[in-house]
Amino acid sequence: MTFFNEQPVTAADKTFFQMRKDIVEGEIASGSKLSETELSTKYAVSRAVVREAINRLESCNLVERKANVGARVVTLTPEGLVELYQVRESLEGMAARLAAKNMTDQEIGDLNVLLNTHFQKVKTGESYYQEAGDVDFHYRIILGSKNKHLISMLIDGIYHLVRMYRVQLGMTGPRITTAFDEHKHIVQAISNRDEELAEMLMRRHILYSKNNVEKKLESN
Amino acid sequence: MTFFNEQPVTAADKTFFQMRKDIVEGEIASGSKLSETELSTKYAVSRAVVREAINRLESCNLVERKANVGARVVTLTPEGLVELYQVRESLEGMAARLAAKNMTDQEIGDLNVLLNTHFQKVKTGESYYQEAGDVDFHYRIILGSKNKHLISMLIDGIYHLVRMYRVQLGMTGPRITTAFDEHKHIVQAISNRDEELAEMLMRRHILYSKNNVEKKLESN
DNA sequence: ACAAATGAGATTGTCGACAATATAACCCTA
DNA sequence: TAGGGTTATATTGTCGACAATCTCATTTGT
């Protein structure tokens, strides 16, 4: 599906990707208004393609539109973060369950390899910016579910918003070692084709992650 | 949120709602190509608003678009139906859990009233076209979760596709009495604020519903 | 005869201009 | 001076035309 090979083909694609990046990384401030004319000059495209990009951003829950008024970048709130993690818990739990059922032995083998790679890095201490590895792990399980809706909801819809929270609230790569153990147990459950356990462990994993993030949020 | 009061304000809204209706009810055939020019004459609007409508339909998973090629109405397959119900099980399970936590006593009271209304109808035998009542029941719980993402994913995103399957594969209002009992138990769990049980019962309810629908699918 | 190249036709993508609506400033009245 | 109404301005919504791309039939060469 749209793993990392989502390459723009049309101008609207390029604009959408660029705007999404700018919003997630805070270059376009959270809560700010999106003026179509302004953006069309900024990105050097017509208003039509900006409009299409904004529509797609709305589908990702990154902006909110009101008819005849305009679009604003979503504002990040503690409640919003909690709601997001609730949905993640639900969907990724199901993804883990389905992955235990539907992943090929080959894919499970690759997942174990990935896990070992992470283990080496954790051991040698270079566990900084574990972000990418964590995302990679979760993506593989999501894709392993082989469920189209699940995949697009999580990867196209929710993960960018999660990343926006992570980046803008300054919580990159936490819980390195403990998260690794949780990953290991999840992979074990998937290897054993234990759907029930895989779902339960994934849900707990995300629940812990939520609690951790909430703690960081309070300390700000 | 978007309960039943989603009223069109712009031409693109109207076109989107109309097209969605036409697709769900099969007036625009599943799998057929959506020609922008053709549709713009059919609905008497410009191509721009048709394009916006198609984009929104894509967000609902009712059509699929390919760059420089065009959009097609999704094709309905047994596998697609299974995937859809897996997502429903996951999301509505969580919705029931959150409803048990977040619904007000007032809202729970209303839910019980609704249930009694259904019970009367079931007893007097006029259980035909229980569809609307069933949807109403599920909507209240979804809204009761008070989770924005959950609500929009289910109501704006998934339910129209579910209805499309129901309508086009000719499976309206099945499992009347048994479904009623399941609803009753779910409401009891919510009344008791038993999150765990509410989620479990809702997941089972949807699982049964899936099995029933699959059986009907085979007999076609 | 078959495969690749080419060209015509149709469809989607992009653009700038105009219409409709909301926001804000201003004026008038009590 | 305060409040309501009105006009002015800016922004979004809609439209038709043009450009870019794909599809498919035809042609051409081996």
Image (cartoon, coloured by chain):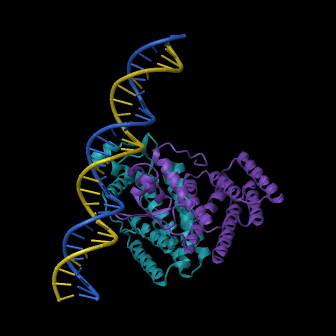
Chain colours: A purple, B cyan, C yellow, D blue
Residue D9: image quadrant is bottom left
Farthest-out residue, right: A124
Task: Look at the picture and state if B169 lies above or below B134.
Answer: above
**Which residue occupies the foreground of this view, C14 or B139?**
C14
**Which residue occupies the foreground of this view, B30 or B215?**
B30
Where is residue A174? Give x, y as percent. 71, 66
Image quarter hosting the C terminus of chain A: bottom right
Task: Look at the picture and state if A82 lies above or below A15.
Answer: below
Where is residue C2? Give x, y as percent. 52, 17
* Count of numbered tags: 0
Residue at the image point whose x is 66% and y is 57% from the top: A135
On screen, residue B179 versus residue A195, left or right, reads left
Residue D2: image quadrant is bottom left
Do we see residue B31 in this rendering?
A: no
Residue at the image point whose x is 74% and y is 48% from the top: A110
On screen, residue C23 versus residue B1, left or right, reads left
On screen, residue B191 versus residue B24, left or right, reads right
Do we see residue A95 in this rendering?
A: yes
Task: Look at the picture and state if B22 lies above or below C10.
Answer: below
Residue at the image point whose x is 47% and y is 69% from the top: B138
Where is residue B177? Give x, y as percent. 47, 68
**Which residue occupies the foreground of this view, B163 or C19?**
C19
Where is residue B199? Give x, y as percent. 58, 71
On screen, residue B212 versus residue B55, left or right, reads right
